[in-house]
């Protein structure tokens, strides 16, 4: 992955940027005005709303995931793998917004497996720090469960406070993940 993410995306995005689906959620008190959160489902790069581009979304994820963030190139690669995988079927990206401001985002990948490994990997989910604890994360995760075809897994560090949210939403910790890194 190179650093010219915007340049790469410009060639894949048409001039007519139309939103594929916009799914309004219920009213949620994410700020004092009780603005409505809208969740956008992106299945390809052409689905990005006009007010956000892939580079801005990657930066949002990177910044909002702190202190559990992955390096920015890894976040960008995750978005590519969700929307335009080099092999396998695409997943999706969810973007939660209020008044064209991103307040949450989620990347879901397809694993290409079934049974012994769940069909979906919830790769990243982030909420703007100023709106945490207001239900935005739960809304986008629940929506991702509705949209995912099959079971969903995710990796979360044991000390990540979001682990409690995942458990409240029905996720269980059946296995400890172990890795051999070369």
Image (cartoon, rainbow, N blue to C red):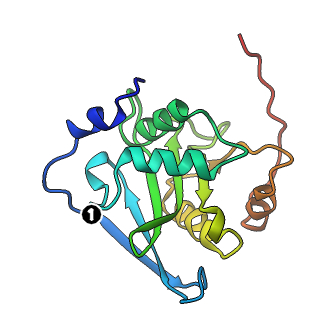
Residue 156 placement: quadrant: top right
Q: Would you place residue 96 above or below residue 115 in this image?
A: below
Residue 73, given in percent of the width and then of the height, sits at 50, 30
The residue labelled by disc 1 is 19
Q: Would you place residue 33 above or below residue 172 in this image?
A: below
Q: Is residue 166 left or right of residue 96?
A: right
Q: Residue furthest left?
A: 15
Residue 76, given in percent of the width and then of the height, sits at 46, 36
Q: Is residue 90 left or right of residue 61?
A: left
Q: Is residue 2 left or right of residue 139?
A: left
Residue at x 54% of width, y 35% of height: 72
Residue at x 72% of width, y 66% of height: 169
Residue 28, given in percent of the width and then of the height, sits at 58, 84
Q: Which element type, helix, strand or loop, lies under badge 1?
A: loop
Residue 138 placement: quadrant: bottom right
Q: Where is the N terminus found, in terms of image quarters?
A: top left
* Residue 121 visible here: no
Residue at x 40% of width, y 38% of height: 89
Residue at x 55% of width, y 65% of height: 140
Mark 1 crowdedness (10 Å alpha carbons): few <14, some 14-19, many ≥20: some
Numbered circles on residues, count: 1
Residue 94, given in percent of the width and then of the height, sits at 46, 58
Q: Would you place residue 90 above or below residue 137 in this image?
A: above
Q: Is residue 170 left or right of residue 94?
A: right
């Amino acid at each position: 992955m190179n650093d010219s993410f915007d340049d790469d995306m410009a060639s894949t995005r048409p001039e007519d940027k139309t939103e594929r689906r916009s799914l309004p959620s219920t009213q949620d008190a994410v700020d004092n005005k009780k603005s409505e959160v809208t969740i956008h489902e992106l299945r390809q790069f052409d689905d990005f709303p006009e007010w956000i581009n892939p580079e801005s979304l990657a930066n949002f994820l990177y910044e909002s995931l702190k202190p559990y963030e992955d390096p920015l190139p890894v976040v960008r690669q995750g978005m590519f793998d969700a929307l335009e995988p080099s092999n396998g079927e695409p997943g999706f990206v969810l973007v939660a917004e209020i008044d064209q401001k991103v307040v949450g985002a989620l990347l879901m990948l397809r694993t290409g497996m079934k049974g012994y490994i769940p069909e979906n990997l919830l790769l990243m989910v982030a909420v703007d720090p100023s709106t945490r604890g207001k239900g935005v994360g739960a809304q986008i995760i629940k929506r991702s469960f509705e949209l995912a075809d099959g079971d969903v897994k995710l990796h979360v560090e044991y000390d990540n406070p979001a682990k409690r949210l995942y458990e409240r939403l029905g996720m269980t910790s059946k296995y400890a993940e172990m890795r051999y890194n070369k």
